[in-house]
Amino acid sequence: MSAAEEPTNPLRALPSVDRLLQHPLLAEAELDPALLTALAREELAAARAAVRAGAPPPDVGVLAAGVRARAEALSRSSLRPVINATGVIIHTNLGRAPLSAAARAAMEAVARGYSNLEFDLEEGVRGSRHAHLEELLRRVTGAEAGIAVNNNAGAVLLALTALCAGRDVVISRGQLVEIGGGFRIPDVLRQSGARLVEVGTTNRTYIADYIAACGPDTAAFLRVHASNFRIIGFTEQPELSELCEAAHARSLLVLDDVGSGALLDTTAFGLAPEPTVQGSLMAGADLVLFSGDKLLGGPQAGIVVGRAELVARLRRHPLARALRADKATIAALQATLLHYARGEALREVPVWRMIATPAAEVERRARAWAAALGAAGASARVVPTRAMVGGGSLPEESLPSFALALTPSSPERLARLLRAGDPPVVARVERDTVLLDPRTVDPSEDAALLAALRRALIADPAGP
């Protein structure tokens, strides 16, 4: 074979890094040269892999466009606000509880500059970050003292480590729960250094089982609320007051993990009863542990309230520093607790505002959405549905609601187009229908949602 007949290596058609960077699309790019060079190398590496797999060599303009796309993707934050139209109020995958306007303003205020996070302004000396929440936690729960850490898993770990390490903790088998992310109570107990003592059965545990398990190494009874599932039928669990009486008669502690942090009565809204923090304290629990970003409606946090001497021991433990909340969390939590202290939670805390919204008001907004889309030539209807509380709170509990219903030829495609929009809109698909529930959409987001819907319907050639 002559030299003229030798096959040309297609990889040689790819430009060098320098030549690619000289393309007009990249020559004027306002990026750090080192970063731009790195992105160009990545684009060329991807092109070489494609060519080796049989693809034709791309044009230099295509490669330059690819580098620009990489740069634009890098400049966009992957964590973005979305419109939650799913009807799930505390949506774990969408950031759980949205914050009140006051909580958001409080976070911005302390993030803007310096703050007295750990500084006593009156005395001019070092202070404690825990002091910012102490009084409010006492007022809204009735506890002697309280502390906040970064989440409820951390709160449980801190309490068990500080108070029960090397000793036995008695818990019902029906409460050895696993919640999202693989968080398992038995694993946390082992990590804390406490020894797990299981009593009873999955569905039935009696106070006698707890008492029989007590020994010289027993430190506490642990009750864990099954916040994301429910066991019904032939079941039995001792009342918390009964558990506290038996524990205190033996100088043992009762730690009550109530999970979602309800400070208001859920039955007032037609929902099943959820244990309240105040109720657990009144029943005699020594420490009550709960989340800040579920039914409390605040930022991600784990809160422990109860006896002052026990909370003081948690504060002094080295693990408390590893788990401590930052200034923005403390600011948002303080603002959220203030809503409860002022008696304005139903109006100001978004989670409770959504729960308390009458179904008739949800229907009115859904019909307004349908009318707006109809005026734009799209076909939509309003259907009755159920909104879920979600977020590991009130399992299987729902509220009557209404949703905008769209029936395109491909519901999944329309849902994907909505998620790809700006802002992304997350809907739910049921029985070949795309449903958007106004209950979980703030009224201030209505215009943006409708605009996103119109764009998605235009982009979907087979839309409704």
Image: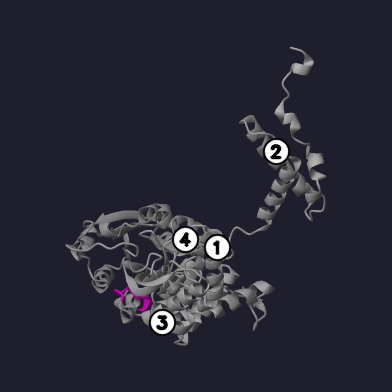
Q: Which residues are magenta?
A: 271-278
139 is higher (above) or lower (below) than 261? below
The secondary structure making up most of the magenta span is loop
What residue sits right under mark 3 in the picture? 361
Asked if residue 283 lies left or right of residue 262, the reply is left
232 is higher (above) or lower (below) than 130? above
Q: Nearer the viewer, mark 2 or mark 4?
A: 2
Across and down, in percent, residue 149 comes to: 50, 66
Name the residue type under label 3.
Glu
Q: How far apart, in angstroms, are the residues tagged by discs 3 and 4?
A: 26 Å
Who is closer to the viewer here, 349 or 213? 349
What residue sits right under mark 2 in the picture? 58
Q: Nearer the viewer, mark 3 or mark 1?
A: 1
Q: How far apart, in angstroms, are the residues tagged by discs 2 and 4?
A: 38 Å
Name the residue type under label 1.
Ile
Q: How far apart, in angstroms, are the residues tagged by discs 2 and 3?
A: 55 Å
Secondary structure of the residue carrying numbered label 2: loop
